[in-house]
């Protein structure tokens, strides 16, 4: 017998929740095949089979809390699943058929082997279940043909191409799991759904930020005409040369890093009675995932090219959808950027990501009439919001920091010249 145990959990994670069993007792399993998913407040861990054999007793059911080295199940190595004994036929009530009219028993034909179920990531599996899809029809683009959530979305996009009026954008947002029954009065149904570990952790950290920081938000607006013109002129050559799309986020990351160099207290954290100044620039990029908002960290941004930044953000977005972000990619960070504009937000007050002291909020680009050189022109405008910890950051520094970002974005040449 081999024991399936809870692997080492990420640092500062005390326990995990058994999320999904992919095999049931009696099923044949192969070494390194994913048996069960464990959900922590940061990531989903896939626990593989330690050996070839047959899955025996499951000792931790879905929804149970487990800790490091807890036995999850047992595997009988090298065993074949036992077939249930066929029930004995009841004796016939009629007389036996004469030999001359008896039919010869049909020859036993070999049964076709059942089709092997494709390997599916946890996020993809949940979406397949929600949409009642056949996973065998979905082409997997991951390692060894693994089906990722992006593959499921691509499959749905292809299926819905004949009906363009239907949108699948909602698939990128968390969906409540189906409930077998509703409660409440007639005509006033209610549904109770437990928080995921990640959602509970998000709630905990937001309350922690409000309790432990003196948050204040300052606003400004930026004219993106020059930036949009520059991007339009070079985005084709940029994508052809670097293989990644030239978005706006790389400009905002570059401008943020330059502004942090000018006002280093925005890149600092409170450590007890001290202020800890960081000499590096690890920027958290808020990304929406099926399990909630996550903030993976783009490290050493002052040393990255525009292509490096765009490629890193694209990789984070893919991993967030697939639920494959690692714990290391979600820890640390000295400053964060969040873009509510992709959902249509015009203005908001972002909340700090503890223990960071600042977060920049981007919003929807909206063409508005503005005055330039005494004339009214139409320009692509965006509101910017900076939430900061007023315990260590004065209003003057916060306002000047945001003005510096505004100036750098309105004249992108300043980013290249370093002035």
Image: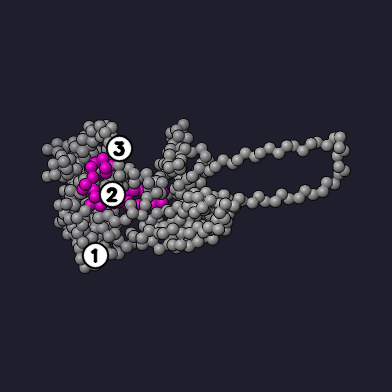
Q: Which quadrant of the view contains residue 212? A: bottom left
Q: Residues within 10 Å of mark 1 (few under 14, many from 20)?
A: few
Q: Which mark is residue 298?
A: 2
For the point 22% across and 52% down, the residue is 281
Left or right for 96, reference 72: right
Residue 358, image x, y percentages = 24, 55
Mark 3 to mark 1 CA distance (whole Å): 38 Å
Q: How crowded is mark 2: few (under 14 residues within 10 Å), some or many (20 or more)?
A: many
For the point 32% across and 63% down, the residue is 208
Q: How crowded is mark 3: few (under 14 residues within 10 Å), some or many (20 or more)?
A: some
Mark 2 to mark 3 CA distance (whole Å): 16 Å
Residue 363, image x, y percentages = 28, 46
Classify mark 1: helix, strand or loop. strand
Q: Is residue 24 above or below residue 59?
A: above
Location of the C terminus (image quadrant)? top left
For the point 40% across and 59% down, the residue is 9
Disc count in the image?
A: 3
Mark 2 or mark 3: whose residue is earlier in sequence = 3
Left or right for 58, reference 170: right
Residue 393 visible to an observer of this rendering: yes
Pick whichever, 165 or 91, lies toward us: 91
- The residue that disc 3 covers is 244
Residue 378 visible to an observer of this rendering: no
Residue 345, image x, y percentages = 31, 46
Residue numbers of the magenta segment: 281-310
- The residue that disc 1 covers is 271
The residue most toward the bottom is 273
């Amino acid at each position: 017998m081999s024991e399936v145990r809870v692997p080492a959990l990420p640092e500062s994670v005390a326990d995990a929740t058994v999320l999904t069993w992919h095999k049931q007792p009696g099923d044949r399993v192969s070494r390194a095949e994913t048996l069960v998913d464990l959900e922590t407040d940061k990531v989903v861990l896939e626990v593989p089979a330690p050996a070839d054999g047959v899955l025996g007793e499951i000792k931790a059911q879905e929804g149970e809390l487990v800790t490091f080295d807890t036995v999850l199940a047992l595997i009988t190595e090298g065993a074949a699943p036992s077939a249930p004994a066929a029930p004995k036929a009841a004796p016939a009530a009629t007389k036996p058929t004469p030999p001359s009219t008896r039919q010869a028993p049909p020859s036993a034909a070999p049964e076709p082997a059942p089709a092997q179920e494709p390997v599916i990531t946890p996020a993809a599996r949940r979406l397949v279940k929600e949409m009642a899809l056949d996973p065998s029809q979905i082409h997997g683009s991951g390692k060894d043909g693994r089906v990722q959530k992006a593959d499921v979305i691509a499959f749905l996009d292809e299926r819905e191409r004949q009906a363009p009026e239907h949108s699948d954008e909602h698939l990128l947002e968390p969906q409540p799991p189906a409930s077998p029954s509703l409660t409440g009065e007639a005509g006033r149904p209610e549904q109770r759904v437990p928080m995921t570990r990640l959602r509970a952790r998000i709630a905990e950290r937001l309350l922690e930020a409000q309790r432990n920081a003196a948050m204040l938000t300052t606003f400004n607006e930026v004219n993106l005409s020059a930036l949009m013109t520059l991007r339009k002129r070079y985005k084709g050559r940029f994508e052809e040369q670097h293989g990644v799309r030239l978005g706006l986020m790389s400009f905002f990351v570059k401008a943020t890093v330059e502004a942090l160099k000018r006002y280093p207290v925005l890149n600092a954290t409170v450590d007890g009675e001290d202020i800890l100044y960081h000499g590096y620039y690890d920027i958290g990029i808020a990304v929406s995932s099926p399990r909630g908002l996550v903030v993976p960290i783009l490290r050493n941004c002052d040393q990255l090219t525009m292509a490096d930044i765009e490629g890193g953000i694209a990789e984070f977005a893919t991993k967030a959808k697939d639920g494959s972000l690692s714990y290391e990619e979600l820890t640390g960070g000295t400053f964060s950027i969040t873009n509510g504009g992709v959902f249509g937000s015009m203005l908001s007050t972002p909340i700090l990501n503890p223990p960071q002291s600042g977060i920049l909020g981007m919003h929807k680009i909206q063409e508005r009439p503005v005055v330039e050189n005494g004339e009214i022109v139409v320009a692509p405008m965006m509101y910017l919001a900076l939430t900061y910890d007023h315990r260590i950051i004065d209003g003057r520094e916060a306002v000047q920091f945001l003005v510096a970002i505004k100036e750098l974005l309105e004249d992108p040449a300043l980013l290249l010249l370093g002035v």
